[in-house]
């Protein structure tokens, strides 16, 4: 096994997820290095224990992505795409969602966010709160 190659692989996979869904963690090199290292070690340990490649990947991914299944940004982006897509061009949706993420981030502190939060009843309340916050922001500021 090539530990450096595996470490790079896991680091790149984690960085891609952070860049797209967890921008608040995308520059946290300590977090990225630690998670990548843990995933690499878990993969190698599982492989040396005789597990097949699929199981090794499953074990490593569990460690690599632990706590990263519910994304605040993805939630804001989903609200922007679902509720406000008719008032802006497709290429404006993500940049606008990034702007709204900073506006909406305090709302999330009112909820206990877990990996399966999106499947609970409180998600609808959060979704509605974010929609209202964005609508008010647009009414006060326009789509600048």
Image (cartoon, rainbow, N blue to C red):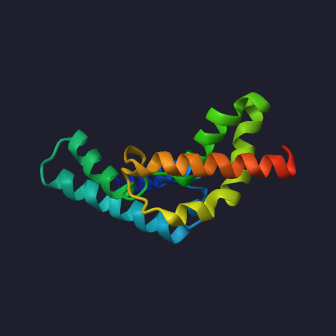
Q: Is residue 61 left or right of residue 70?
A: left
Residue 89, quarter of picture:
top right
Q: Residue at x 65, y 35 (%)?
A: 83
The answer to whether any part of residue 53 appears in the image is yes
Q: Position of residue 54 (x, y in %)?
A: 24, 39
Judge by depth and name the residue closer to the eye, 21 or 138.
138
Q: Is residue 12 left or right of residue 84?
A: left
Q: Position of residue 67 (x, y in %)?
A: 39, 59
Q: Is residue 102 left or right of residue 22?
A: right
The answer to whether any part of residue 20 appears in the image is no
Q: Residue at x 58, y 59 (%)?
A: 26
Q: Is residue 107 left or right of residue 141?
A: left
Judge by depth and name the residue closer to the eye, 1 or 108.
108
Judge by depth and name the residue closer to the eye, 54 or 79.
79
Residue 94, quarter of picture:
top right
Q: In this rendering, is residue 23 above or below 135?
A: below
Q: Residue at x 59, y 61 (%)?
A: 107
Q: Position of residue 118 (x, y in %)?
A: 42, 46
Residue extending farthest to the left is: 50
């Amino acid at each position: 096994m090539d530990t450096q190659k595996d470490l790079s692989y896991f680091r790149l996979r984690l960085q891609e997820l952070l860049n797209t869904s967890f921008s608040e963690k995308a520059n946290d090199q300590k977090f990225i290095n630690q998670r990548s290292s843990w995933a690499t070690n878990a993969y190698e340990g599982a492989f040396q224990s005789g597990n097949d490649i699929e199981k090794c990947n499953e074990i490593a991914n569990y460690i690599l992505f632990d706590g990263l299944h519910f994304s605040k940004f993805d939630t804001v982006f989903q609200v922007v795409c679902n509720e406000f897509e008719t008032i802006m061009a497709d290429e404006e949706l993500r940049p606008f969602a990034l702007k709204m993420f900073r506006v909406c981030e305090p709302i999330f502190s009112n909820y206990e966010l877990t990996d399966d939060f999106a499947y609970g009843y409180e998600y609808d309340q959060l979704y509605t709160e974010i929609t209202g916050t964005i609508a008010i922001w647009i009414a006060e500021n326009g789509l600048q």
